[in-house]
């Protein structure tokens, strides 16, 4: 066991940045409700509006087009409901559940084997759809780190007068991301994914003239787009964290180097890397260790004081093979052998030294225990390669992957 706690689950939540803590502490004693007209209310409103200007400036939107929400999930759901109102909703097969479960009926846009959304199929889907559409595509995937080419998808959407919502929850603070440069209709970001407190996020809008009914009408806050008294101190922490994350984007080169070192140690021990190796989040790797279940790897590493995750277990603590890998045509039993390692903003060399030392030993032990118990997976051969070629487009069998097959809310 390492004598230190090594946290490599940043895509579940990032450690709080000191700038965010300071901003929150400073704001906590501000008494007023930002909707109140008196001096206390105006003081609270000043903090909110400063935060709004900061977020708008950092991520390329006008302050009036920043809608504060409770987090990334709410920002995505608000986009689907209010921007997809009376439209056909099409979402990428590897989207987060926040998007997948938001529309009452949605259509799945298949991805290539490397996890990148298939733009040619999007064209076909939009041609065949009679209504105007809202297309939801994530900028960077939370499990593999794969980056979608928004510059390719946007012209397809524009040709068909479709709106494009980009889930930038994992990308913001790790890649240079601005809505005005992406050119999409809207973008979701989340505070706790960039080192702020949980409990805040934002939907950024770009020249949106028709916004459907808000999910929460309440007292008409956020320009009538999201009712409810906002958590002023949390929003102050969100803005401070975003400012620090964007100012330190240059550090992603160091983090990518550490990620590559961890990945190389895993590969030397027999692991296979999923996703697009060329276009990935700098802090993320999704590893499959043939013959060793992912949930067992996570537990064994936890006992060694190393925190990683099994798929996007950040959402519910569930131990099911990832839908992301399955959409990438990875067989179920292989997806069950995958873990996600995601490096936080404050990761150190020593953290990665610990991972490189411990991981090969842990998987070897699990593999021998599995073999001894006779329950190794059907494909325990490390030389059998899964579908990982970055340029291969898989066939898309089955109703669930048929472009125009509607998906139920909990598909
Ligand atoms: N979108 C993506 C890509 C995510 O990874 C997550 C969380 O993991 C969300 C949305 C939801 O964000 P939040 O946890 O802030 O609700």
Image (cartoon, helix red, strand yellow):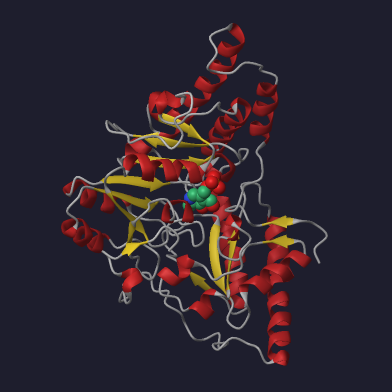
Left or right: residue 214 versus residue 315 is left
Looking at the picture, does residue 16 appear above or below residue 32?
below
- Seen from the viewer's position, the closer of residues 215 and 251 is 215
- Number of dots carrying numbers: 0
Residue 165 figure quarter: top left
Residue 394 figure quarter: bottom left
In this view of the protein, can residue 357 be seen by the observer? no
In this view of the protein, can residue 213 be seen by the observer? yes
**Residue drawn at point x = 45 percent, y = 26 percent:** 222
The C terminus: image quadrant: bottom left
**Residue drawn at point x = 81 percent, y = 67 percent:** 1
**Residue drawn at point x = 68 percent, y = 23 percent:** 28
Looking at the picture, does residue 53 appear above or below residue 300?
above
Q: Where does residue 281 sit, x and y in percent of width and height?
A: 48, 55
Q: Where does residue 264 sit, x and y in percent of width and height?
A: 58, 70
Residue 66 figure quarter: top left
- Seen from the viewer's position, the closer of residues 101 and 12 is 101
Taking the view exactly as shown, the residue that stands out farthest to the right is: 3
Q: Where does residue 375 sit, x and y in percent of width and height?
A: 65, 88
Left or right: residue 150 versus residue 308 is left
Looking at the picture, does residue 405 appear above or below residue 178?
below
**Residue drawn at point x = 62 percent, y = 71 percent:** 265
Q: Where does residue 124 sit, x and y in percent of width and height?
A: 19, 62
């Amino acid at each position: 066991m390492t004598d230190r706690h090594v946290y490599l689950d940043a895509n579940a939540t990032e450690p709080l940045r000191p700038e965010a803590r300071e901003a929150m502490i400073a704001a906590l004693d501000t008494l007023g409700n930002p909707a109140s007209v008196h001096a206390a209310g105006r003081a609270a409103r000043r903090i909110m509006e400063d935060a709004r200007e900061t977020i708008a400036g950092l991520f390329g939107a006008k302050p009036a087009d920043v809608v504060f929400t409770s987090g990334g999930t709410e920002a995505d759901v608000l986009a689907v409901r209010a921007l997809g109102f009376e439209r056909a909703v099409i979402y990428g097969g590897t989207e987060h559940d926040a998007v997948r479960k938001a529309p009452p009926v949605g259509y799945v846009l298949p991805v290539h084997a490397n996890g990148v959304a298939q733009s040619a199929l999007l064209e076909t889907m939009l041609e065949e759809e009679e209504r105007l559409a809202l297309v939801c595509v994530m900028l960077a995937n939370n499990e593999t780190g794969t980056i979608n080419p928004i510059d390719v998808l946007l012209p397809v959407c524009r040709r068909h007068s479709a709106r494009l919502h980009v889930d930038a929850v994992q990308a913001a603070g790790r890649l240079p991301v601005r809505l005005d440069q992406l050119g999409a209709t809207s973008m979701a970001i989340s505070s706790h994914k960039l080192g702020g407190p949980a409990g805040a996020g934002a939907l950024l809008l770009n020249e949106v003239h028709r916004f459907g009914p808000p999910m929460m009408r309440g007292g008409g806050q956020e320009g009538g787009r999201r009712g409810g008294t906002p958590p002023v101190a949390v929003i102050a922490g969100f803005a401070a964290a975003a400012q620090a994350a964007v100012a330190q984007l240059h550090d992603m080169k160091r983090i990518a180097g550490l990620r590559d070192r961890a990945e190389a140690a895993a590969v030397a021990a027999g692991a296979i890397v999923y996703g697009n190796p060329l276009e990935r989040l700098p802090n993320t790797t999704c590893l499959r260790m043939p013959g060793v279940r992912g949930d067992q790897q996570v537990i064994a590493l936890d006992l060694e004081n190393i925190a990683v995750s099994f798929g996007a277990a950040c959402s519910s603590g569930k131990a099911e093979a990832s839908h992301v890998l399955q959409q990438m045509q990875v067989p179920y039993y292989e997806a069950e052998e995958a873990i996600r390692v995601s490096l936080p903003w404050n990761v150190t060399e020593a953290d990665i030294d610990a991972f490189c030392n411990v991981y090969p030993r842990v998987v070897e032990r699990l593999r021998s225990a599995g073999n001894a118990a006779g329950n190794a997976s059907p494909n325990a051969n490390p030389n059998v390669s899964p579908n990982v070629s970055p340029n291969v487009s898989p066939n898309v069998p089955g109703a669930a992957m048929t472009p125009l097959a509607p998906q139920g809310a909990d598909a």
